[in-house]
Image (cartoon, rainbow, N blue to C red):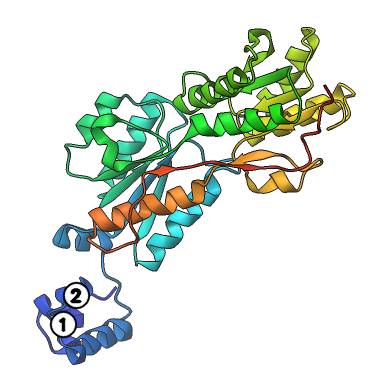
Amino acid sequence: MATIYEVSKLAGVSLATVSRVMNNNANVSDATRKKVTAAMSELGYRPNSIAQSLASNCSNSVGLLVSELQGPFYGPMMSGIENIFRNQGKHVIIAAGHSDEEREQQGIEFLISRNCDGLILHVEAVSDDYLIKLSKGRVPFVLINRFIPELSDRCIILNNIKGGYLAAKHVLEQGHKNIAYISGPLWKKDAQDRLAGHKQALAEFNLSFDEQLLYQGDFMETSGFEGLKTIYQQGGSFSAVICANDEMATGAIASARELGLALPEQLSVMGYDNVFFTRHIYPPLSTINYPINEMGKMAANWVLNHVYQKQTEPLQTMFEPSLVARQSIKHCPQ
């Protein structure tokens, strides 16, 4: 395997000059840079990226921690983030925290140990105190879907209260009064906020929230299936079900069909997230658009701006949801 010394000798330059070329130092003439890169190509020399990062204090890599690697929600976010960094000559290292405090901390420590220049964190279980302490460390980070007042300038969030409100308001405007609700895990802030928005819309229509029509799911398809079946078998009377994400909504649709309910004639279904498959299922699912791809890109721009001092588009921390009305909600006659 060729060494940096052989590159230096073939190119006729010093070791320091070869190092400057490898680290894209501006204080190298074009002619010298071409001689060095030609020598590297001829010898098949590949720079040691770890050694480079130690020498330059920059690894050109960014750590990304997400809750899950599976499912249709995180893919667009990860893809958008990776695409932005690849276009800037950076690489992304991905870890998963699985909404577990210990695993999230392990994932963060792993990414820091990989000498990442910055971190993008989608974390739910680690405490605010942990993240506040982490912010005083050497590795800058930005949070997605998490708001901490002390770190407000690095929190990129969605207005989930508004999202829950828009979902319920649309169903209510179609004449539905008895509405079942399948929530996410209510220890999670986004699940709490979506339910709070739901209750706000009910109050505007002078309706009270019926706890018997609530099922606490886990954002997975199976809990949507079990949730609808449980509420139905308990004798709850409802003409619509609102699910706190699209995966649970697809589970609810499958459960409704197994129970012999015609959709949307006998049961209207509402989702949340607007993942790619919602427009292809039958009936096409009404949902709330969660611009997670744009939020991921904004987090990437935050890192480019704060870590690599690159000018980007103006940074935005609060994103707004919007209604996507399709055919899964049918007007309910009074």
Q: Quadrant of the N terminus?
A: bottom left
Label 1 residue SS: helix
Q: Are marks 1 and 2 in contact (CB under 8 Å)?
A: yes
Whether residue 136 is visible here, answered yes or no, is yes
| Position of residue 45 measured from the top left corner of the image (x, y, whole percent) | 29, 76
Q: CA distance from mark 1 to mark 2?
A: 6 Å
Residue at 54% across / 27% down in the picture?
A: 194
The quarter holding residue 23 reads: bottom left
Q: Which mark is residue 8?
A: 1
Q: Nearer the viewer, residue 46 or 79?
A: 79
Going by the numbered disc 1, the residue's amino acid type is: Ser
Going by the numbered disc 2, the residue's amino acid type is: Ile
In this picture, residue 277 sits left or right of residue 137: right
Residue at 27% across / 57% down in the picture?
A: 305
Tag count: 2
Q: Nearer the viewer, residue 218 or 57?
A: 218
Residue at 45% across / 25% down in the picture?
A: 189
The quarter holding residue 178 reads: top right
Q: Residues within 10 Å of mark 2 (few under 14, many from 20)?
A: some
For residue 290, above or below residue 189: below
Label 2 residue SS: helix
Which residue carries the number 2 mark?
4
| Position of residue 192 measured from the top left corner of the image (x, y, whole percent) | 49, 22
